[in-house]
Amino acid sequence: MNDATGRIEDHLKRTRVSDTERFLRENAALFTDPASGFPAYMRLLLKQKGLRQQDVFLRADISEGYGYKLISGEKRTRRRDTLLRLFFAAGFTLDEAQKALRLSELPALYPRFKRDAVLMIAFNSRLCDPAAVDELLTLHGLAPLLLTNPAEGGSAG
């Protein structure tokens, strides 16, 4: 969590229900709109990493058309594994992946869930191949990352 987020959380602890409108008005510039936040964040990280979107989609085994729609914000997914495949394929750090999950309004990885803990280890170990992540998960008796649903434009079910 960055300093600005920590300050917002501290301020929220002291904000009463009756002060909600004032809080929202005074802090409007600090809020991130998930509808635009996730696509902008994804494009920024891919650019910073010098990655081409189509290369990331190929490594993640996600169709280009569907991948472009996800990154543009035209489509959203409720399947966290679909985004995790993208994040691993793009070489995201754990912090980058956690922020992207929050911006997409999906649950962040939680260290007390065994599968999430293994995924966190994979991010921290810089595994950038979803197939290698799947091997690590199955080695520990856990479900691999699901491939994108064909109805969403993916290649497998």
Image (cartoon, helix red, strand yellow):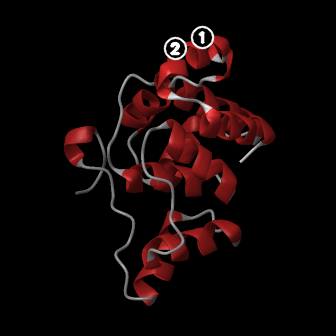
Residues 26 and 127: in front is 26
Q: How far apart are marks 2 and 1 (CA)?
A: 6 Å
Residue 103, placed above or below residue 147? above
Labelled disc at residue 139: none
Location of residue 78 by image quarter: top left
Task: Identify the residue position indicated by label 1 in the image.
Answer: 25
The answer to whether the residue labelled 2 contacts the one labelled 1, judged by CB atoms less than 8 Å apart, is yes
- The answer, for residue 5, to whether it is visible in the render is yes
Q: 48 or 64, which lies in front? A: 48
Q: Where is residue 83 in the image (x, y as percent from the top left)?
A: 46, 48
Q: What element carries label 2?
A: helix
Residue under the image location 61 percent in, 40 percent down? 13
Residue 108 in percent (x, y) is at 50, 54
Q: Residue at x 42, y 46 (%)?
A: 106
* Type of amino acid at the residue the image marks with label 1: Arg
Is any atom of residue 126 visible in this view?
no
The residue that disc 2 covers is: 21
Q: Where is residue 25 in the image (x, y as percent from the top left)?
A: 60, 10
* Left/right of residue 9 with respect to residue 64 in the rendered view: right
In the image, taking residue 79 as reference, residue 108 lies left or right, namely: right
Residue 121 x, y percent position in the rendering: 62, 74
Disc 1 element? helix
User: Which one is closest to the eye, mark 2 or mark 1?
Assistant: 2
Does residue 5 lie above or below 86 as drawn? above
Residue 101 against residue 130 in the figure, above or below: above
Q: 14 or 112: which is nearer to us?
A: 14
Amino acid type, label 2: Glu
Left or right: 45, with 152 as reference point: right
User: Which one is nearer the viewer's eye here, 127 or 76?
Assistant: 76
Q: How crowded is mark 2: few (under 14 residues within 10 Å), some or many (20 or more)?
A: few
Residue displayed at 44% across by 74% down: 113
